[in-house]
Amino acid sequence: MNSIFKYLRSKLHVLLFILLEIFCIIMIVRFNVRHSSFFFSHTRELTSKLHEINSSAFDYFALYAKNEALTNENLELRRALKSNFVIESKKVFEVNDTIFKQRYKYLPASLITKFTNGQNNYITINRGSASGVEKNMGVFSSQGVIGTVVEVSDNYAIVQSILNTTGFKVAPKIEELNDEKGTVVWDGRDPNYLSLENVNKYEPIKTGYHVVTSSSSKAFPENIPVGTIEKIEKKPAEDFYKIQVRSAVNFGQIKTVFVVVNLFSDEIETLEAKVKESESQQVK
Amino acid sequence: MIVTILKYLGLYMLIVFIQLFILSNLFINSSLSFLFQPQLIVMFLLLLPSSMSHAWLVFVSFLAGLVFDIFFIQYGIHAAVSTVIGFSRYYATREVENVISAREEDNQIWTSKKGNAWKWTYFLTFTGIYHFLFLSIESLGSNFFIRVIPSVISSTIIAFVLVLILENLIYKPVRN
């Protein structure tokens, strides 16, 4: 021990020199902006190079674990894909009122597929008999009437759209006249235009009048827009106008639709069935 | 002992004053600074007694450099170079006998003991080393051959001449 101290004492000047030089270098780097920036930029270059060498040498050993981690991550991401999920929201808009008994309720639905290019256009929605969708229910969007349900499965339904040459069953009403007139059909050419047929020549119809659903249709509530009258043609040989109606719905942009559930439809149907029965009995 | 310390303190203050009021205004803070940066502190380091122990020499050199740094706001650079000079100077001067201790009153210094040729070599070498190290650190990052080398040569020459003149003005030559 003593000899160590003796040795250190004999080399005191060297120790002192080294210590003071280290102190000076720290001071230079610490207090001089230019020197510190020079020092740190160069040392950073060096250290980053060392890190690079280190990682390039040792990366290979971790490849297996990295591969596994990547595979797991891929699996997780695949599980989270949106296409794996079905919207299960069974939200239904209902109103409970003692004076006004609710006649219609609406089921929101999203479009799965849509065709607007053919002669008979159908739309598939993600609501089916599980949510209470039945045949002949009306479907509309925030813009206006879309069509009626023609086929139902458990979770999906097919809607025959208004753009259909086989005939669309809705009784239209002219909003300004508050009167039911004619029928709305599609001629199969331009998806933006419908035509209103069987309107008598002597009716005071003008362009700009709005065509909406009437109260007599079972599938739709009253006053859902169908279109706007854009052109009226009168032909001397015919008793009816030829009216062009601009469709209220832009069929290219539909995203969300509502299915109309008429809560009284069963009642009405049974009544009508009774009338028909009695009529047929009278005939006999 | 105390007289010697006071004498060296006086020498140090004189050097700082010369540096601060004459050399700084004449060279370092002027348009000539790119070529002439004489640092007179090297004179103090070279004239420290040759009888000092090595560790003390290193420490006193460091302190002198540190104070110089504080005066000229170059924290650490003078101290670092001064410590190097103090450390290496010992090996050149350890064989020189110290004559001052015997006749302090005569205002003599030991540097002439070995003759003028030795003295000049001694001054020139360490002045050169000092300026080389100082300017290399000070102008760190700039072009070494264009900026540093010419500046080192011119500053060394000026500092060397100044050290010789001042030494002859302040001290009497040693009588052999």
Image (cartoon, rainbow, N blue to C red):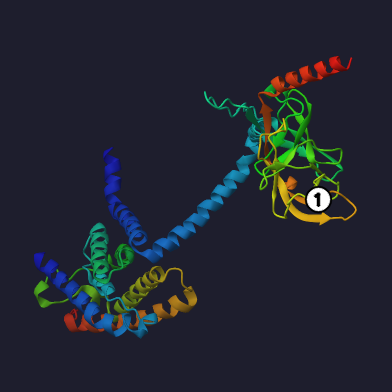
In the depicted structure, whether residue A129 falls above or below residue B164: above
The part of the image, by quadrant, that contains residue A35 is bottom left
In the drawing, does residue A254 fall left or right of residue B54? right
Q: Position of residue A107 (x, y in %)?
A: 65, 30
Closer-to-camera residue (B76/A139): A139
Residue found at x 21% / y 83%? B168
Residue A78 in view here: no
Closer-to-camera residue (A8/B152): B152
Q: How many marks?
A: 1
Secondary structure under the numbered disc 1 in the rendered image:
loop
Q: Position of residue A179 (x, y in %)?
A: 70, 42
Q: Position of residue B81 (x, y in %)?
A: 33, 66
- Which residue matches tag 1? A201
User: Amino acid under label 1?
Assistant: Lys
Residue found at x 88% / y 56%? A236
Q: Position of residue A120 (x, y in %)?
A: 85, 40
Characterize the local packing of mark 1: few (<14), some (14-19) or many (20 or more) Cα atoms within 10 angstroms. Answer: some
Q: Quadrant of the C terminus of chain A?
A: top right
In the drawing, does residue A189 fall left or right of residue A180? right
In the drawing, does residue A52 fall left or right of residue B32? right
Closer-to-camera residue (A236/A143): A236
The part of the image, by quadrant, that contains residue A258 is top right
In the depicted structure, whether residue A143 falls above or below residue B4: above
Residue A17 in view here: yes
